[in-house]
Image (spheres, helix red, strand yellow):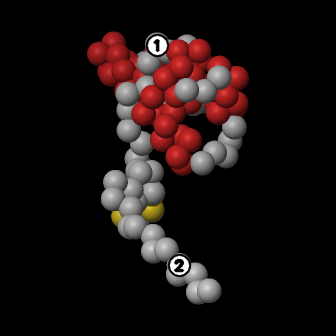
Amino acid sequence: MPTNIQDVIKQMPAAHQKRVKERAAELIAEEMTRQQLRRARKLTQTRLAKKLGVTQDSISRIEKRTDLLLSTLRGYVEAMGGSLSIVAEFPDRGAVILSGIAEVDPDPKPRRRKRVHH
């Protein structure tokens, strides 16, 4: 007969059950959808839209999309008061925060004008 995790937890001492529940809550909080994050920050789509200078419908579409530009996601997170980091994870080493992807280049190189010969 298969073992049910809830039954295993119920057999643990009360203090250990509490630690398991707290850690489970921490792990769940580490991963959220964009909508869950916005709600956790106590923002409505309308308020966030005003901060970004877009319509409420735009926020709704951002929250539903599975593929969006990093600049869009960065703006969405920054409008909530956060900052965006991109982390690469590998099985043979620790996590690596990728730089130069999610942030705006603070000092872009000036573009040279092409000379037009007449």
Is any atom of residue 29 visible in this view? no
Task: Pick whichever, 81 or 91, lies toward us.
Answer: 81
Q: Which residue is rendered at x = 49% and y = 74% of the image?
A: 113
Residue behind mark 1: 42
Q: Residue 50 at x, y = what percent?
A: 53, 20
Q: Which residue is rendered at x = 33% and y = 13% of the image?
A: 14
The N terminus, quarter of image: top right
Quarter of the figure with residue 99:
bottom left
Q: Is residue 86 above or below residue 25?
A: below
Task: Pick whichever, 86 or 31, lies toward us.
Answer: 86
Task: Pick whichever, 43 or 87, lies toward us.
Answer: 43
Task: Pick whichever, 34 or 25, lies toward us.
Answer: 34
Q: Which residue is rendered at x = 29% and y = 16% of the image?
A: 15
- Which numbered disc, 2 or 1, marks the residue closer to the eye? 2
What's the mark number on residue 28? none
Residue behind mark 2: 114
Side of 106 where 2 appears, left or right: right
Q: Residues within 10 Å of mark 2 (few under 14, many from 20)?
A: few
Point out the tag, 2 or 1, that comes first from the N-terminus.
1
- Which amino acid is tagged 2? Lys
Q: Is residue 63 above or below residue 18?
A: below
Q: Residue 93 at x, y = what percent?
A: 36, 64
Using the numbered discs, state the Cα–Cα distance from disc 2 to disc 1 in whole angstroms: 50 Å
Q: Residues within 10 Å of mark 1 (few under 14, many from 20)?
A: few
